[in-house]
């Protein structure tokens, strides 16, 4: 599959996401935020970093970039779209995902290997996991606290839109320990932790038995996309 990775001014992890796609056996395609051409890609990744305008509200200005018009349209037609960290923030700001992301409850930037529980396994990006499976994905954010209104949170939980939940200590105060959500169709997923940093042994989480294989992120980019391609 051809997987587009969008770069915005301030994006930090676009090259890492491209590398993850390549290690997963697919072809990464670099996309620029000012373009309207998705170059015939089969899926899209909005990587993490600090996009321009984040000082106003994370992802709010980037969500208005020209290419986001195409991303919203493609998502509406069923194309798989993954938003990671800042990309997750863009997806909520663009209205593709429910809720929003705000400053961590502690007011501190958090960086650590984070345990997650996979909640919904019927999305384009999580179907390589078993329901309730625990994985380890690196986390690094200062504004990763998931919030929503009470009514919206009830809808998210009631419709099973939680894709990932923090296991153990909640790192940022997210409501209901939510680390990632999906849209109803399951083709759009956003998560705060960075799966692109858990795709190669020695370059991600601790590979001891306690931290599993250190390759949990690769499952998101490999098995999930293979099933979509099939």
Image (spheres, grey):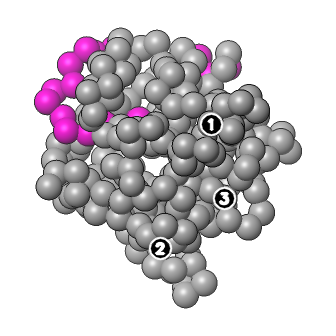
Q: Give coordinates of residue 125: x percent, y percent.
A: 37, 52
Is residue 108 in view? no
What residue does disc 1 label?
155
Distance from Cα at disc 3 to Cα at disc 1: 19 Å
Relative vertical location of residue 191 with respect to residue 221 in this rendering, above or below: above
Image-quadrant location for residue 220: bottom left
Q: Which residues are magenta?
A: 31-55
Q: Residue reaching furthest front?
A: 158
Distance from Cα at disc 3 to Cα at disc 2: 17 Å
On the rendered structure, is 125 left or right of 111? left
Residue 69 included in the magenta stretch of the image: no
Disc marking residue 166: 3
What type of secondary structure mainly makes up the magenta span? loop
Give whichever of 230, 143 is nearer the camera.
Answer: 230
What residue does disc 2 label?
214
Mark 3 secondary-structure assignment: strand
Residue 48 included in the magenta stretch of the image: yes
Relative vertical location of residue 205 with respect to residue 106 in this rendering, above or below: below
Q: Give coordinates of residue 27: x percent, y percent.
A: 17, 48
Comparing labels 2 and 1, the label whose residue is closer to the camera: 1
**Residue occupying image coordinates x 36% and y 21%:** 72
The crowding category of the residue bearing disc 3, from other C-alpha atoms within 10 Å (few below 14, some 14 to 19, many at least 20), is many
Is residue 103 in view? yes
Of callouts 3 and 2, the N-terminal one? 3
């Amino acid at each position: 599959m051809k997987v587009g990775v969008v770069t915005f001014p301030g994006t930090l992890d676009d090259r890492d996401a491209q590398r993850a796609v390549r290690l997963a056996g697919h072809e990464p395609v670099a996309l620029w935020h000012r373009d309207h051409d998705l170059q015939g890609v089969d899926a899209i990744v909005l990587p993490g970093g600090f996009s321009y305008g984040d000082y106003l509200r994370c992802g709010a200005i980037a969500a208005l970039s020209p290419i986001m018009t195409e991303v919203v349209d493609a998502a509406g037609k069923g194309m798989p779209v993954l938003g990671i960290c800042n990309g997750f923030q863009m997806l909520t700001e663009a209205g593709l995902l429910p809720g929003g992301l705000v400053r961590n409850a502690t007011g501190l930037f958090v960086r650590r290997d984070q345990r997650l529980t996979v909640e919904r396994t019927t999305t384009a990006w999580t179907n390589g996991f078993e329901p309730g499976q625990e994985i380890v994905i690196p986390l690094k954010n200062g504004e990763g606290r998931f919030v929503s209104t009470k009514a919206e949170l009830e809808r998210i939980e009631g419709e099973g839109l939680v894709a990932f939940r923090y296991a153990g200590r909640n790192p940022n105060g997210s409501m209901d320990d939510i680390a990632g959500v999906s849209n109803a169709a399951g083709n759009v997923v956003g998560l705060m932790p960075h799966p692109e940093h858990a795709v190669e042994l020695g370059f991600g989480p601790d590979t001891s038995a306690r931290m599993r294989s250190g390759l949990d992120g690769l499952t998101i980019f490999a098995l999930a996309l293979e099933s979509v391609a099939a």
